[in-house]
Image (tube, rainbow, N blue to C red):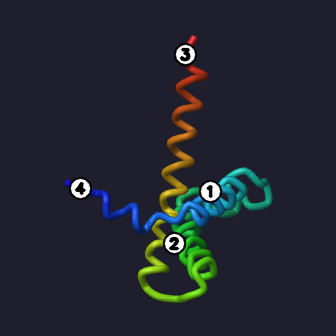
C-alpha cells in the first residue's frame, strides 16, 4: 500500500506548533483536567485552525491537511518518547 500521497497533506509548521501545545497540555499542572485521551482530538482541531490561518484560506483540503498535521504531531511525540525510553533502559 503506497502512502506517499499523505506527504502533500503534511504541514511542518502546523505539526511543530501542535507538538508544542500537546507537550504543554500534557505537562502543565493546571491543565491536568484535560484527559490524555482528548489530546489527539484537541491537536487535530487546533491543526485545522492553524492551517487555515497559515494558508489564509478556509477549504476542506486545508482543514484536512491541518488536522492530519496535528495528529502527526501526536505520533511524533510518541516516537520521541519511545526512543528516549529505549536509550534509558539500555545499560
Residue at the spot of label 1:
19
Camera-side mark, 1 or 4: 4
| Residue 87 versus residue 36 in the image, above or below | above
How far apart marks 3 and 1 lie (CA) works out to 27 Å
Q: Where is residue 82? Give x, y as percent.
A: 52, 35
The answer to which of 86 and 51 lies nearer the viewer is 51
Instruction: Decide: few, some or many residues near mark 3? Use Cα within 10 Å; few <14, some 14-19, many ≥20.
Output: few
Q: Closer to the N terminus: mark 2 or mark 4?
A: 4
Q: Closer to the N terminus: mark 3 or mark 4?
A: 4
Looking at this view, name the residue that lies furthest to the right: 30
Identified at 77% across, 54% down, the residue is 28
How far apart marks 1 and 4 lie (CA) works out to 26 Å
Residue at the spot of label 3:
90
Residue 66 has which mark?
A: 2
How far apart marks 3 and 4 lie (CA) works out to 34 Å
Residue at the spot of label 4:
2
Q: Closer to the N terminus: mark 1 or mark 4?
A: 4
Dividing the picture into quadrants, the one containing residue 50 is bottom right
Give the structural element (helix, strand or loop) at label 1.
helix
Give the structural element (helix, strand or loop) at label 4.
loop
Residue 8 has which mark?
A: none
How far apart marks 1 and 2 lie (CA) works out to 13 Å
Camera-side mark, 3 or 4: 4
How far apart marks 2 and 4 lie (CA) works out to 21 Å
How far apart marks 3 and 2 lie (CA) works out to 37 Å
Identified at 56% across, 71% down, the residue is 47
Instruction: Decide: few, some or many residues near mark 4? Use Cα within 10 Å; few <14, some 14-19, many ≥20.
Output: few
Q: Where is residue 32? Give x, y as percent.
A: 71, 57
Give the structural element (helix, strand or loop) at label 2.
helix
Camera-side mark, 3 or 2: 2
Disc 3 vs disc 2: Cβ atoms closer than 8 Å?
Answer: no
| Residue 90 versus residue 10 in the image, above or below | above
Amino acid at each position: 500500500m503506497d502512502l506517499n500521497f499523505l506527504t502533500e497533506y503534511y504541514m511542518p509548521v502546523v505539526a511543530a506548533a501542535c507538538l508544542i501545545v500537546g507537550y504543554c497540555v500534557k505537562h502543565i499542572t493546571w491543565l491536568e483536567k484535560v484527559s490524555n485521551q482528548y489530546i489527539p482530538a484537541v491537536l487535530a482541531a487546533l491543526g485545522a485552525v492553524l492551517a487555515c490561518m497559515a494558508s489564509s484560506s478556509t477549504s476542506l483540503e486545508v482543514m484536512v491537511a491541518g488536522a492530519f498535521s496535528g495528529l502527526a504531531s501526536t505520533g511524533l511525540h510518541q516516537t520521541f518518547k519511545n526512543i528516549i525510553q529505549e536509550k534509558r533502559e539500555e545499560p
